[in-house]
Amino acid sequence: MGLIVQKYGGSSVADADGLKRVAARIVATKKAGNQVVVVVSAMGDTTDELIDLANQVTPLPNGRELDMLLTAGERISMALLAMAISNLGHEARSFTGSQAGVLTTSAHGKARIIDVKPSRITEAINEGAIAIVAGFQGINQDTKDVTTLGRGGSDTTAVALAAALEADVCEIYTDVDGVYSADPRAVPSARKLKTVTYEEMLELAASGAKVLHLRCVEYARRYDLPIHVRSSFSNQEGTWVVKDHPEGASDMEQAIIAGIAHDKSEAKVTIVGVPDRTGVAARIFQTIADADINIDMIVQNVSAAATGLTDISFTLPKAEGAEATQILNDIKGEIGFQSLQYDDQIGKLSLVGAGMRSHPGVTATFFACLSEAGINIEMISTSEIRISIICRVEDLEKGVKAAHSAFELDVDGEAVVYGGTGR
Amino acid sequence: MGLIVQKYGGSSVADADGLKRVAARIVATKKAGNQVVVVVSAMGDTTDELIDLANQVTPLPNGRELDMLLTAGERISMALLAMAISNLGHEARSFTGSQAGVLTTSAHGKARIIDVKPSRITEAINEGAIAIVAGFQGINQDTKDVTTLGRGGSDTTAVALAAALEADVCEIYTDVDGVYSADPRAVPSARKLKTVTYEEMLELAASGAKVLHLRCVEYARRYDLPIHVRSSFSNQEGTWVVKDHPEGASDMEQAIIAGIAHDKSEAKVTIVGVPDRTGVAARIFQTIADADINIDMIVQNVSAAATGLTDISFTLPKAEGAEATQILNDIKGEIGFQSLQYDDQIGKLSLVGAGMRSHPGVTATFFACLSEAGINIEMISTSEIRISIICRVEDLEKGVKAAHSAFELDVDGEAVVYGGTGR
């Protein structure tokens, strides 16, 4: 007897058949003697269809109203899922983010969960019902306005709810059957990981692996909550995201590199001719941060002694590129830099593995294999368990394959990928 | 400067163009110096589409979950309408039934409004914003579950909200340009009424006229709130529903009969061979009432002296026919009646007019015209300002036309009807 939180993405509940299949799986979990809380995303392409509708009405939808609109998506899927479960003879009650006590900040479209007060969920499961909760949404604790958490938000809802309920596990059902050593779409020989640590998963997510959202892993680590990433289309075990790799795992499981992530969604901004004075870099990045733009890698060259000028490059999501360059141009006079360069033809390749700590040769092997593949490294950034490089976007997949082979991660046979992506 | 509540039905906001047209009308009202609160239904066929989805998942959707599902419809339309208004440069904020303080009973699918506490709406309009409120929905004040008010519920939301806000007028925008002396689809020469009293409108609505919902008129009468029924497709004045016809109205406006309603949605149940004892009829109708079935006309024949048995007939909505006959069969042994007859091929024809009070000849004229048209009267029921008869359903429209002519209600030219119906 346990308490299990399950999260199903939009591709798992894309139509009536999907809803029925998911309902059967939930009922099976309940029949096995567990209390079950389910977090569900909007059906299939509902969110995109609602955004299309908004764009037909206005080019710039108001954030509060866009959140009100989009949250209709989960309202539909959760009510239908509850009905499908009732139809199998089990009681199910659906709850909006607000009803489930998901309290957030006020940033419409990218709100953060501040607290979860799931008293109605606890009441429902203690009365023997299955609770269905709308993913991706919450309520601004000050104004009581409806908010959404942004892409990947349903995963975060599930983990935050699981933590608040002190669940035994949070099962994230998705369209792949686990976390792979590389994106199976790019590397057909990628292998499924049995376990991955929170740290590794955080680095993988931050580096572009799309299986789990960064914030959801942060939440799980903070509360030491095991996540089981698996497919809703099969009954196979997936990947467990846990604190440590299990003792006595095989050599294969103890590989130096857990996985290789790649990311084509970033762009590079270079600020040319920045005066090398104290406080200038701080002023630049504070301005960027104030606009709520997330920057990733930063490189600053040594300044030329003759001019006292330096160049600063940083990477950021392409979607925020226009805003960032606008903001920087606004302070051009104040900072006194010469020009801005914007490059959206870059790719990021990252090696992640807790084993790096005790294997100093990883960097050398990595750079050597890229060199052999004829790939030029433009920027480098490292953490204790990650090395990331920036290269031309057209070289990216070649680099992933080269590194995957160099670190002996390949397995025979191809990985299983199921269509679509959820949010 | 006034406070105006406007209600737009689903056919007025069926697509992006409809939303933009309605937004322009709302902004014009605001620019004329009014505070504006808007109640909106779900877009076009959204509600039917959601019901279809539910039926794909289960044959018997749970009431709580069906309400959760259907309320997604207004959430979509109200958010889009708020965006369309913002796009015209005016601030608009959308509110769910719950956020607007619409407190209801717990009867899912047919909840009644108990109270409206619109503090968030007042705050919004006092800050200069236009408030958009989801029609048709509220929140169970005990359990905090989402409820819906049933068909026509958005009209009731609008009037209840207007009453709570002490609005100057509640404008109901619909697909016809007012209340007619008969359904223009059946009687092309029907004429639009400039005014109709609450009493007349109540009788018309109860008799099958679909322009306004019964409960919404009851609400308006209780708070003496003027309703202006008009079309969202034109700028013409519609029909004012008020306490009294204005002094000095023309003879035309002082017609004895305000309108003729007809209704094909009822069926007749006859309980044959009921023992003519005290309390038997009460037992029968209490049983029906306990099941929340609304009966309309009741006729009991004089009992035959030889047998001490009588027949009782009553009419009720066809949709509730199966349940009513089931319930009556369950108490057959206890009551001791002989058999049940069920007839769903009936039609109801009603004359309504405050002028009847001072014109005793109305009944005679009415029956004479039906007789001339060869229509047999099966049941009769009257109130102070209404006469209703039951006839064969195939005679119904012939009867409406005959009565419309007999009371000289015809005008030259055809009435204007715009497509679709809202809720």
Image (spheres, coloured by chain):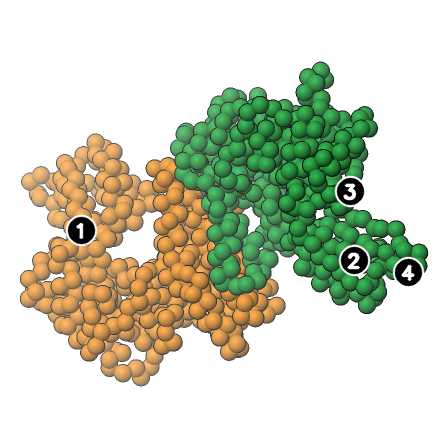
Chain colours: A orange, B green
Q: Which residue is mark 4?
A: B307
Badge 1 and badge 4 both on one subunit: no
- The residue wearing badge 2 is B271
Q: Amino acid at mark 4?
A: Thr
Can residue B7 be seen here? The reply is no
Give the camera-side residue of A111 and B169. Answer: B169
* Amino acid type for the residue under numbered disc 2: Ile
Chain under disc 3: B
Residue drawn at (77%, 45%) of the image: B379
Q: Which label was assigned to residue A299? A: 1
| Quarter of the figure with residue B360 | top right
Quadrant of the drawing holding the N terminus of chain B: top right
- Label 1 amino acid? Val
Q: Earlier in the sequence, mark 3 or mark 4?
A: 4
Above/below status of B251 relative to A233: above
Position of B228 with respect to A389 (left or right) is right
| Above or below B381: residue A368 | below
Residue beneath disc 3: B380
The chain containing the residue under callout 1 comes to: A
Give the CA separation, mark 1 to mark 4: 104 Å
Task: Name the secondary structure under disc 4.
Answer: loop
